[in-house]
Amino acid sequence: MQLTTKFILAIVSFCLFASPSWAENNARATPGSDLLVLTEKKFKSFIESHPLVLVEFFAPWCLHSQILRPHLEEAASILKEHNVPVVQVDCEDNNLVCLQQTINTYPTLKIFKNGRLFDAQVYRGTKITAEITQHMLQLYEASVIYLDSEDEVQPYLENTTLPVVINRGLTDLNETYREVALDLADDYVFLSLSDSKNKSLSVYLPNVTEPILFDESVDAFVGKPDTLTQWLKVVVLPYFSDVTPDLFPKYIASNLPLAYFFYTSKEELDDYTDVFTQLGRENRGQMNFIALNSTLYPHHVNFLNMRAQFPLFAIHNMINNLKYGLPQLPEEDYLKLKAPHPLDKDMIAQLVKDYREGTAKPIVKSEEIPKEQNSNVYKIVGETHDDIVHDDNRDVLVKYYATWCIHSKRFAPIYEEIADVFGSDESIRDKILIAEVNSGANDILSFPVTGYPTIALYPAGNNSKPIIFNKIRNLEDVFEFVKESGTHHIDGQAIYNELHKVKDPEESTQDTVHDEL
Ligand SMILES: *[C@@H]1O[C@H](CO)[C@@H](O)[C@H](O)[C@H]1NC(C)=O
Ligand SMILES: *[C@@H]1O[C@H](CO)[C@@H](O)[C@H](O)[C@H]1NC(C)=O
Ligand SMILES: *[C@@H]1O[C@H](CO)[C@@H](O)[C@H](O)[C@H]1NC(C)=O
Ligand SMILES: *[C@@H]1O[C@H](CO)[C@@H](O)[C@H](O)[C@H]1NC(C)=O
Ligand SMILES: *[C@@H]1O[C@H](CO)[C@@H](O)[C@H](O)[C@H]1NC(C)=O
Ligand SMILES: *[C@@H]1O[C@H](CO)[C@@H](O)[C@H](O)[C@H]1NC(C)=O
């Protein structure tokens, strides 16, 4: 009982009730001030896109909120210069956010760091401009530890389990360094020796004496926190390493193409380690190299579009999801092997080089090219897709389907009927091709489809881009779509009507015969 009373008191200790007589909503930021007002819609993305934000959760009718407003506006102006936004959320209008943030009293000030929505700290200092500003600035700078001399560095190197980043005398980098430090404070230690004559940026890995030195002009990082962050994320990765699942996220986070070596034995891994370490060094910042135990991760190759034949080398570009690999054997030849077939080290280096130069060919998953086409629906496979759909003379309508998809199954007979209509006359067949792709068995790199069935029209001529059909999948709407979107404006409905006019008398004769029976 007492606890409940305490709790209620806590809630109402600032604002007891609304008092409409002087509720002029003047707790809300003056238009044009640096204090921003956020709505529920924008809240998440705003927090996520700023490393450090001070948020006031307020109620417009609350006197304490009203008193705080000018202080916050002033703090906002000062902090703006350090890229620390100060924002307001009106809890009357944005109930859900305030509920999620467990706001019990108005106003509540919370500090959001590193784009994290749910572990903001409550600001408990005095709610006046000077204190708020000072607190935020301290926080902003705290993630970098400022040292006066080299002697102070050693203890940090000795005890750390984290990589230690040291900025020696690169004062142009101050701002960017601080910004990145706030972001990465959980994974690195950031030191700054502003007075050092030795101007350098280096990273000391735990238990490694030799630091990694950034050996280009630091201008590359000034004002570019993303670039510095990327460098730090890559530089801590080994040139080549046998990865365990806990390391994998670091490779994903680096966003670089990942080169995989799947090995079958310790001896094999040892045999290739020098080659891959060298490649890792040469391609630092462009591609990461890892080894995987093929016994532990045999299925991972499926997603690399390769067969489970080991040892294996493949490259995955995580941005566009393209995959590259050394040629593999036909399955029956692989099964006949008495011992693992070694990979050619020169071919590995060549594939990496070709990849870097943009001349490597991705592995396209494709069915065999059909020897004959025996339906009005033309079967396209991964390898033939781009050549077929980009036709100078014909509009090409393509259905991308999945065998497991019920909507694909339902639409199949309708699509066949459409194909039969357009295939009914040679003069029409010269102007339009009706085709389909089994998307489960064929990668279409130029047009990755995610929903099935997807119907698209490639108008005749000029490497045209696909136009996607997004109406109801029936005869009439597809005919209409082809007529409107195609280069030839073929009227499928008219052809259909014509065909049925000819057929109808026959059918009715047959019907009559039936009736007579
Ligand atoms: C490092 O560890 C030693 C011994 O445990 C300790 O005396 C020293 O204070 C630590 N230094 C820092 C900077 O944490
Ligand atoms: C560093 O070396 C010590 C002693 O050899 C070891 O206990 C520790 O786990 C190592 N730390 C890292 C991060 O590898
Ligand atoms: C960078 O920070 C140091 C230490 O706070 C300061 O002495 C120096 O003047 C700053 N330099 C610039 C260019 O901001
Ligand atoms: C500057 O520091 C780097 C990294 O610690 C070091 O490799 C280099 O030798 C130093 N240069 C001078 C002139 O002290
Ligand atoms: C690969 O994994 C298998 C299965 O856990 C294990 O027996 C083998 O020793 C591992 N190979 C190496 C080189 O670690
Ligand atoms: C293809 O594009 C060129 C230049 O954009 C144009 O001159 C030509 O008429 C186009 N051909 C067709 C078939 O659309």
Image (cartoon, rainbow, N blue to C red):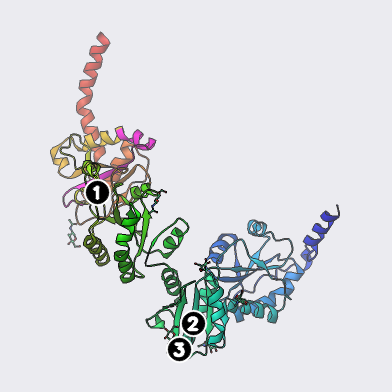
Label annotation for residue 486: 1
Three-letter amino acid code of the residue under disc 2: Asn
Query: Which badge, 3 or 1, comes first in the chain's sequence?
Result: 3
Mark 3 or mark 1, which is nearer to you?
A: 3
Instruction: In the rendered structure, find residue 198 and report the number of the disc placed on it.
Output: 3
Image quadrant in which the C terminus is located: top left
- Mark 3–mark 1 CB contact (< 8 Å): no
Q: Nearer the viewer, residue 332 or 19?
A: 332
Rendering coords of residue 172 (x, y %) = 47, 86
Residue 17 in view (yes/no): no
Percent coordinates x, y for residue 507 in the rendering: 23, 21
Depicted 148 relative to depicted 121: above or below: below
469 displayed left or right of 35: left
- Ligand 4 lies under 8 Å from the Cβ of mark 3: yes
Q: Quadrant of residue 415?
A: top left
Task: Tell me the residue at 29%/65% (across/down).
Answer: 275
Q: Secondary structure at mark 1?
A: loop
392 in the magenta segment: yes
- Whether residue 453 is visible: yes
Circle 1 Cα neighbour tier, 10 Å, few/some/many (<14 / 14–19 / ≥20)? many
Residue 20 quadrant: bottom right
Label 2 to label 1: alpha-carbon separation: 61 Å
Q: Amino acid at mark 1?
A: Gly
Q: Position of residue 235 (x, y in %)?
A: 42, 71
Q: Which residue is mark 2?
A: 167
Judging depth in this view, the residue of 376 and 300 nearest the camera is 300
Say what secondary structure mark 2 lies in: strand
